[in-house]
Amino acid sequence: MLFREHGKAVYNHCFRLTGDWAGAEDCASLVFLEAWRLREKAEPHGGSLLPWLLGIANYVVHRRRRVARRHQALMERMPAPGLLPDFADEVVGRLEDQERIAAVRQVLDRLGRSDREVLALCVWAGLDYTAAAQALGVPVGTVRSRLSRARRRLDGLARKNLALPMEPAVAGWQLTGDRTDAVEPHERKAR
């Protein structure tokens, strides 16, 4: 009954204070919610509750403006969003890497377990011969021979399965001594 009697007057008052149709609707709704919450304190003025409702409307509109100002101030303090990088090139690169890894895995799967283990430790993990021997529980000479055999076999399988051209510099890479750095064949002779 209260809404039917004063709803239009409260809405018009809220609209005059906000200048925004949607904002006035929100405020009018909040006025009647507050009126319900404060119904015990309602005091009719001259038999009408309209002055009391318009007082609540003033409070609701004021609070809405204060919240909007705080929100705006907070938004202004936030750093401006930067440009998002284009991830398309990265995605394409990852897909290409995934295809290459799949092809390499097919070749590696054709090697024996001991050859894969020594390749993983010496080439990928960067362990020297002594550390790889300790990890595998075999003598250092065994690691050297397995690595040499694995490289020759891997080179042949890669050329056959991946159609790689023969590159003398790549074919001759090997680990020297107990170090993990690779040298080309012509550098080995000088050492």
Image: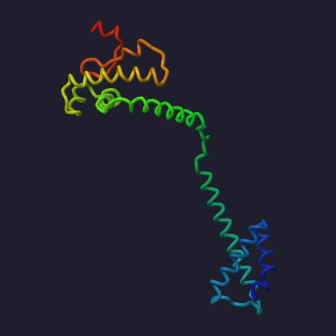
Quarter location, residue 58 = bottom right
Say above or below: 172 vs 6.
Answer: above
Q: Nearer the viewer, residue 146 or 112?
A: 112
What residue is rendered at 33% in x and 9% in y? Answer: 187
Say above or below: 90 vs 142.
Answer: below
What residue is rendered at 62% in x and 51% in y? Answer: 76
Q: Nearer the viewer, residue 190 or 6?
A: 190
Question: Which quarter of the image is occupied by the C terminus?
Answer: top left
Q: In the rendered view, does 73 fall on the left or right side of 138?
A: right
Q: Residue furthest bottom?
A: 47
Quarter location, residue 151 = top left
What residue is rendered at 20% in x and 22% in y? Answer: 141
Coordinates of residue 13 in the picture (x, y in percent): 79, 75
Say above or below: 39 vs 60.
Answer: below
Question: Which quarter of the image is occupied by the N terminus?
Answer: bottom right
Coordinates of residue 33 in the picture (x, y in percent): 67, 80
Q: In the rendered view, does 59 fall on the left or right side of 169?
A: right
Say above or below: 178 vs 124.
Answer: above
Q: In the rendered view, does 93 fall on the left or right side of 120?
A: right
Q: How is the image coloured?
A: rainbow
Q: In the rendered view, does 59 fall on the left or right side of 132?
A: right
Q: How many badges with numbers are in the image?
A: 0
Coordinates of residue 6 in the picture (x, y in percent): 78, 83
Coordinates of residue 188 in the picture (x, y in percent): 30, 10
